Image (cartoon, rainbow, N blue to C red):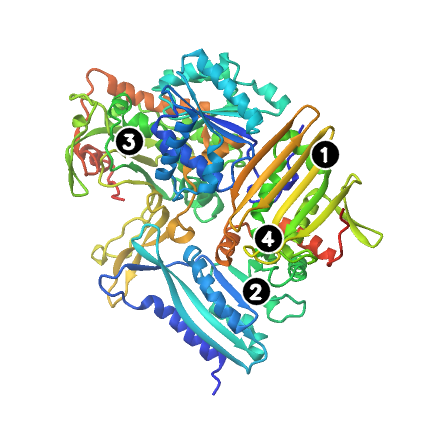
Amino acid sequence: MIGPNPLRRGLVEDRASDSCAVVIFGASGDLTRRKLMPALYNLAWAHSLPGGFAVVGVARREKSDESFRAEMKSAVSAFSRRKPIDSVVWSDFEKGIGYVRGAANDPSTYEALRAHLERMDIERGTGRNRLFYLAVPPNEFGPIVEGLRSSRLVVPAARERAEGIWTRVVFEKPFGHDLASARELNDAVAAAFDETQVFRIDHYLGKETVQNLLVFRFANSLFEPIWGREHVDHVQITVAEDLGVEGRGKFYEQTGVTRDIVENHLMQLLCLTAMEPPISLSADAVRDEKVKVLRSLRPIENDEVAGNVVRGQYASGVLHGEEVVGYRQEPDVAPESRIETYVAMRVFVDNWRWSGVPFYVRAGKRLARRVTEIAVAFREAPHTLFRARDGGITPNVLSLRIQPDEGIALRFISKEPGQQTILRDVAMDFRYGATFGSNTPEAYERLLLDAMRGEATLFTRRDEVEEQWAYIDRVLRAWGSSDAPAPPLYAAGSWGPELADELLARDGRRWRKP
Amino acid sequence: MTIAPGVVLARIDEELRALWTTPAVAGEPLKSRACTMNLVVVAATPAQADQCVAFVDEVVKNVPARAIVVGLDPDGRNELEASVSAVCAPDPGGRTIVCSERVTLVARGALCNRLSSCVQALCATDVPTTLVWLARVHSDDPAFEPLAREARRVVLDAGQSSIASLSHAVRWARSRPEDERPGIADLVWSRLASWQELCARMFDPPRLRGLVRRVTRVSLLQACPTGAPLAPEGALLLGWMATRLGWKTASLAGKLRLVRPDGGYVQTQVKQQPVDWAPKGSLLGLELEASADGLAILGEVARQDAAQAAWRVRVSSDSETQHLEQHIRLRPTGVALVLERTLHRPSQDDALADAAIWADELRGEELAGA
């Protein structure tokens, strides 16, 4: 058993990654250019990469190492949060960047990859540790996993422990298309990898503000006692985007917002809001509690979908003062498309803490503004001393803004100074940017480093993914039936279809306009 | 006529409130007051305090605080001088202006002894206090201890004062009850973070992990004229390694030697090189050698200029030799940035405390070298 490095004890970076090679499948794609390579560069800038390190891009196009490096340099220049690019950091970082041309289902790809990685072990000291990052469409997951397995690029977990080396694989969402495909994919992955080697990424979990949810809830004694049915009236979770499908019409026609956002990001936010305190911050302790929430979700049966779920599709409209086209006018979108670009749901968590408290969740594209927030609305004061004309009593709301303007605000009522008793809503407002500065790590920096370190807390486990799909699948099946109505249209730049307002109005509530 | 300190403090308190009650001029961006801590910076002289104002203003733009910058003039006549300013910067979104407050004080004569009561009257409530003490620390200093007792963190600068001052502060903090113990930080220590990271990195690969217990040679190169003693940066880095790896000092023939827990000696070399691009006493390079069971490592960190260093490792075994080399951008070492980084570190740092006490125990004794 190899002990920890004593020189790491007490260092700010006390959990260094082992030397390793990161292999990115889908190296020509947007994710690699916009997120992965800038994140790795920023880790290099911050001295967070190990001494022995290499990045290998794998994609179909013919490229040399040099041209791939040049391409990545311009990507990092454009998309890194640290600008301009630091010549000292880059010149060193790029020496470890290489490229292997190949297709997912071609065995020679893996032979070439193996040869490249063995060369990196010698030249770059990558120590036979590999992190395979699958930044590819889900239909390529299976062939790549099989390719890695059959070419023996995956070291079995038991042998890893004995030899002190590791192989890990990172999957980008969506992990499956429905419950059946997620299970099938999980089975294929399990045939090649041990679950401890698998890292299913949901980049929302890498966001500082999402991680702060646990700190906020479990490090402050003030909120946890009132975090439940006795004090909370309802919870609203909003993931709103002002962008349309942005050239991803083909992808969106196969997914829709429910698969793209609700099944993963939104369900994760719900879990972190509703979960019980974990016994520790270990990966399994946290994930166990999230799974318990998912298993507590009241299933929405086929005949209940219409009463609890509203979908919509954006039509043309005006956004930020400019006219924008509707979803069906976007490139690669069918003129009669029934794909939803908006969904709102009333969700119940049937457990002791949340019994009877509705969680209203919504996600949509081309909404009035880009905002992600969790808003906890508290019950009204039990007895009203003040008259309505005094300004009225509105419930206290605690809002946790995930993006933009990351922060936490608490709305409460105050008396306006003066002879009369006039009540006003005021807010205590904490903003991350103002307090801690804006230069916080990108989600992908944190997640890549965690994967290199083998820290799985911020990644989703197999049972989590399957529970998420199990919940969403019922809704998708109901929509897929032949008698299901087409999603109603909503004007781009609005807050979604009117039916979504009615969903809350029936309960005597209304959506926030965050 | 001398104005009573109480009157000065009351006026400052009023001015602080007035900063935020003045109605905004129409069309001006909204100003938000932000305060995450009281940042009390104490300089040995009023002139030094004047110099601190610039870096304090830089720091509070990124770490919103109520800054209280104090200059001491114990030989002056008893009086307190004070002024107030708002230090503002646009927030990252650019929609509002975020402002910190800065109070500057000059405590003269007996007011130096009563400094803590003056400072406490001006501290914002419900936020922690960080004391940045830019003077020597003596055991009987009536200004230091009352201020340090009220702080959650005390930041020193061994480069400006001494390892003995830092060690004194560490020992004093350790003598406090655990729940009243401020964390001790040091600007020299914060500057060493990159060096520590680069040293640790040499032994991260599992097959080299065992070699860290078998270091046979440490060589430090510092920026100073030939013959200069071990400077605080080198002393703290050596103290850090020694305390992490369990090295003890043993005297032989009038010189101190470093002894590993397994009884082996660690040869120590301190070399000097005067350069014009690095502050006097700062580290320019480091070499580490270790070997065991047919495996040997030679690790080196060599500063190439003020901002970059080369990290090199050569690993040799019976069958092969592997070379790794990286070029590293070093963190800026200006006071404002180093202080800001220090404020973002955990406040309790046992590694610093252990290293400072170890380094102090050398007391300038010569280490046995080659």
Q: Residues within 10 Å of mark 1 (few under 14, many from 20)?
A: many
Q: Are marks 4 and 1 in contact (CB under 8 Å)?
A: no
Number of residues whose C-alpha sits closer than 10 Å to that of mark 3, classed few (under 14), some (14–19) or many (20 or more): many
Protein chain holding label 3:
A
Residue occupying the point 37% across, 20% down:
A62
What distance separates the C-alpha of mark 3 from that of mark 1?
64 Å
Disc 1 residue type (three-letter): Ser
Residue marked by disc 4: B189
Q: Amino acid at mark 3?
A: Met
Which sits in the foreground, A407 or A463?
A407
Q: Nearer the viewer, mark 3 or mark 2?
A: 2
Q: Amino acid at mark 2?
A: Leu
Residue B282 position within the rendered picture, expressed as x and y whole percent measured from the top left: 60, 54
Are the residues flagged by discs 4 and 3 in contact, CB closer than 8 Å? no
The residue positioned 27% from the left and 50% from the top of the image is A394
Q: Which residue is mark 1?
A: B291
Chain to which the residue tagged by mark 2 belongs = B
**SS for tag 1?**
strand
Residue A474 x/y as whole percent: 31, 21
Q: Amino acid at mark 4?
A: Trp
Say whether residue A465 is visible: yes
Residue at label 3? A345
Quarter of the picture containing the C terminus of chain A is top left
Which label sits in the foreground, 4 or 3?
4
User: Tag 3's secondary structure?
Assistant: strand
